[in-house]
């Protein structure tokens, strides 16, 4: 993560120095390192090479057939026949091939954007999980300390005969459960850290000493979008939908190419013959006669593939609409839950303040204040879970649209060339 090329790449795109690795900076790091981006770029490179191949014109063929007449008494018994076969494509076949390759190249380019969004989505999910584990661990540490204080106070009261041993045992069980929960979340945090490194495309040791920022994930999201607007953004901007349209356009060009193949190509055959001292010139013309078939099979197959491409596009569009409806419904429900959790936490904190004032006034025992603090910690965990659920719902909605929604200006430009290779060339 301290690679000089990565730093230049991130700071050039963010227009600022990196002091802490937040979601935009980590997204750029993933676009810089993750091998999925290399695969998508390589696939696009193959598709671009297909455009070059589609534009090639067929080469002429030269045939040479020397001979020798052993039964002739003429001055020169040698014979030489040379001919050229110059193919000439008709009916615009080359143009249709280029159009098909161009649409396939565009589909591969759009796939690069889709893969980049998938990389970003994984980074956001893993970062959100790390945020949840980190904040939960912090709260559980305070809860464990407060539970230990409750056990200590109950033991004092047990010695004074004010409480029973059963109550002390119950408090000790709660303390051990808090310790177990803390150990479990520490394990989860270590696993999520590995998962975050994998989402970035780096080994986990690369995160050692790296300051990670959870800015933007530690609050309830405030994006309010109408269903129609979300649908419009998705159907006009998703890379896979635009790629499916390019695939359909490629299938249309393929059909046009098969239709054009009904018209045979022309082969010009200029030739020269040296026949025992005589020079003879010829000009041949050959055309394949469409006597037995007019490429009906190729046309039928291309038409069926075009229908298949249309069906795939329609099915993808229907899936996207369903995903958007489900994601938006889940997002709105998660926001309502988060708002309720905020209100409950505010009430619990007021209760703790009341218990604090009563304790300072000598009207209640320290045990009551500790119990109020435990209630606050429990509510904080519930509120954290609600915020994480709301952020996950926002992530699902962003995945449906395939663009950032909170903040909407956080779009990252996808590097079409390998930034590591560009930096390597720059530093040489």
Image: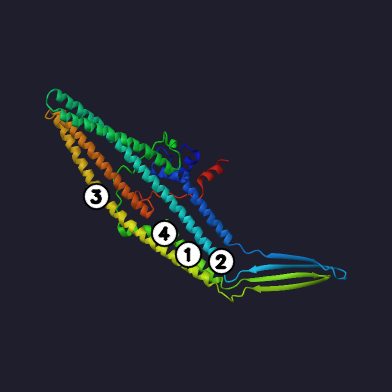
Of mark 3 and mark 1, the one earlier in the sequence is 1
Left or right relative to 214: residue 264: right
Is there a contact, CB below 8 Å, between mark 1 and mark 4? no
Instruction: Choose between 55 and 258: the one closer to the eye.
Output: 258
Question: Helix or strand or loop: what does disc 4 sit on?
Answer: helix
Q: Earlier in the sequence, mark 4 or mark 3?
A: 4
**Which residue does the image show at 55% across and 40% down from the upper left?**
427
Secondary-structure class at tag 1:
helix
| Cα separation between marks 1 and 4 | 13 Å
Mark 1, residue position: 249
Query: Most extreme residue toward the bottom, as rendered?
Result: 291
Nearest to N terminus: mark 2 or mark 4: 2
| Quadrant location of the N terminus in the rendered image | top left
State the residue position of label 3. Answer: 336
Image quadrant assignment for residue 156: top left
Q: Nearer the viewer, residue 119 or 164?
A: 164
Outermost residue toward the front in this view: 71
Q: Are marks 2 and 3 in contact (CB under 8 Å)?
A: no
Disc 2 and disc 1 in contact, CB within 8 angstroms: no
Residue 15 in view in this figure: no
Mark 2 and mark 4 residues within 8 Å of each other at the beta carbon: no
Q: Which residue is mark 2?
A: 95
Q: Which residue is mark 4?
A: 241
């Amino acid at each position: 993560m301290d690679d000089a090329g990565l730093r230049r790449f991130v700071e050039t795109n963010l227009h600022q120095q990196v002091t802490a690795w937040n979601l935009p900076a980590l997204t750029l790091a993933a676009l810089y390192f993750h091998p999925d981006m290399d695969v998508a770029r390589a696939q696009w490179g193959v598709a671009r090479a297909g455009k070059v191949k589609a534009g090639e014109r067929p080469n002429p063929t030269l045939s040479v057939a020397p001979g020798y007449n052993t039964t002739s008494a003429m001055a020169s018994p040698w014979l030489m026949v040379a001919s050229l076969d110059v193919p000439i494509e008709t009916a615009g076949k080359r143009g249709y091939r280029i159009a098909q390759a161009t649409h396939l190249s565009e589909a591969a380019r759009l796939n690069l954007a889709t893969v980049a969004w998938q990389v970003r989505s994984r980074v956001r999910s893993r970062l959100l999980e790390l945020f949840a584990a980190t904040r939960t661990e912090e709260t559980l540490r305070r809860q464990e300390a407060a539970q230990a204080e409750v056990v200590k106070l109950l033991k004092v009261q047990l010695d004074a005969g004010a409480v029973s041993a059963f109550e002390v045992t119950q408090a000790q069980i709660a303390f051990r459960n808090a310790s177990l929960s803390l150990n479990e979340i520490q394990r989860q945090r270590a696993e999520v850290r590995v998962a975050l490194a994998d989402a970035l495309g780096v080994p986990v040791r690369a995160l050692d000493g790296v300051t990670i920022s959870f800015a933007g994930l530690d609050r309830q999201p405030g994006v309010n979008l109408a269903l129609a607007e979300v649908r419009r953004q998705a159907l006009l901007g998703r890379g896979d939908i635009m790629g499916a349209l390019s695939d359909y356009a490629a299938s249309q060009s393929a059909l046009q190419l098969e239709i054009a193949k009904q018209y045979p190509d022309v082969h010009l055959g200029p030739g020269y013959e040296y026949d025992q001292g005589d020079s003879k010139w010829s000009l041949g013309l050959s055309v394949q006669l469409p006597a037995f078939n007019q490429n009906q099979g190729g046309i039928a197959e291309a038409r069926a593939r075009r229908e298949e491409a249309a069906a795939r596009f329609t099915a993808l569009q229907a899936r996207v609409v369903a995903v958007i409806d489900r994601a938006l419904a889940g997002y709105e429900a998660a926001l309502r839950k988060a708002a309720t959790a905020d209100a409950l936490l505010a009430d619990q904190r007021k209760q703790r303040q009341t218990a604090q004032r009563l304790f300072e006034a000598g009207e209640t025992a320290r045990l009551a204040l500790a119990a109020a603090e435990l209630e606050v910690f429990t509510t904080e965990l519930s509120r954290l879970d609600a915020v994480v659920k709301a952020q996950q719902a926002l992530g699902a909605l962003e995945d449906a649209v395939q663009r950032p929604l909170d903040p909407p200006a956080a779009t990252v430009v996808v590097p079409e060339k390998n930034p590591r290779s560009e930096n390597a060339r720059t530093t040489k």
